[in-house]
Each structure stands twice: as structure tokens, then as C-alpha cells.
Amino acid sequence: MTESKEQNVRLDKWLWACRFYKTRNIARQMIDGGKVDYNGVKAKPSRIVEVGAKVKLLQGNVRREVLVVEISDTRGPACVAQTLYKETEESIKQREKQLEQIKINALLAPHPDEKPNKKDRRALINIKYGM
């Protein structure tokens, strides 16, 4: 990975290099959609990343808050990408709480034991659309 104190890297490229998002296009869409904050302010994809900045982002259903430790514009292995940022303690606690809540909600949702057959599907359609 190329690391330098004077390297100018865009926010969307840094998020992609840190493996928060699979493609730069997805990173750009998340930034444009207001799902990423840079130092508490709504960011633009072309924002230059600085060491020590605080980035809040939405990854899936989980909100994360990370501090920029290093800057890189190259996407590498996950173990190297994790050295580019440090997640805050508060964010880790909040993320664990959110994941626990998601698991509880999944257990409370009804799960059929088997796939409905043709007769059951027709009955469900009749209930749903009132036919």
C-alpha cells in the first residue's frame, strides 16, 4: 500500500481502500446519500482525507465511527486495510448493541418450517390482495 503524509486521497477512494464498501461507486453513492459524515459534517466524495479525522459511516444496517490513522489509495488485503483506521470504543459498543437487537428481532419474526405449497401460496395471495 502506498502511504504518505502528503498524499491527497479522496474520501470515496479511502473508504474503498479500507474495504468499507465493495466498489468506489457504492462508496460514492453512500456519501452522496448522506450516509457518511466527515468530522461531523456531510461530506462530498472529492473531500481530501486527513490523518486524525473522524468518519461516521453506515455499513449495511450498522453505523460505525472510525478515526483515520493512515491514508492509502490502494485496495489491499483486509488485514492491511484494517490498519488504515481505528474504530472508537463508543462505536464498538453501539455496533454490538445493534447486532444483538437485530438477532433478537430475527428470533421474534415468524419462520415457517417449510416452503408453502401451491395451495398455501394461493391462500396467502387471497389474504394479501383480498381476492
Image (cartoon, helix red, strand yellow):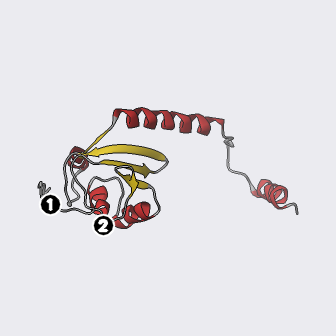
Q: Is residue 118 left or right of residue 31?
A: right
Q: Are marks 1 and 2 in contact (CB under 8 Å)?
A: no
Q: Is residue 12 left or right of residue 70?
A: right
Crowding at mark 2 (Cα within 10 Å: few <14, some 14-19, many 20+): few
Local SS, label 2: loop
Q: Is residue 91 left or right of residue 50?
A: right
Residue 96 against residue 58 in the figure, above or below: above
The quadrant holding residue 131 is: bottom right
Q: Position of residue 85 (x, y in %)?
A: 26, 45
Q: Position of residue 34 (x, y in %)?
A: 46, 59
Q: Amino acid at mark 1?
A: Gln
Q: Which mark is residue 7?
A: 1
Name the residue rendered at 12%, 54% in the picture: 5
Q: Residue furthest right?
A: 131
Q: Nearer the viewer, residue 117 or 106?
A: 106
Q: Which mark is residue 61?
A: none
Name the residue rendered at 14%, 55% in the picture: 1
Distance, label 1 to label 2, CA atoms, is 14 Å
Q: Position of residue 46 (x, y in %)?
A: 30, 66
Name the residue rendered at 23%, 46% in the picture: 52
Name the residue rendered at 21%, 61% in the picture: 73
The quadrant holding residue 22 is: bottom left
Q: Position of residue 17 (x, y in %)?
A: 26, 57
Crowding at mark 1 (Cα within 10 Å: few <14, some 14-19, many 20+): some
User: Mark 1 or 2 closer to N-term?
Assistant: 1
Q: Amino acid at mark 2?
A: Ser
Which residue in the protein does label 2 denote? Answer: 46
Residue 97 against residue 124 in the figure, above or below: above
Q: Nearer the viewer, residue 91 or 53?
A: 53
Local SS, label 1: loop
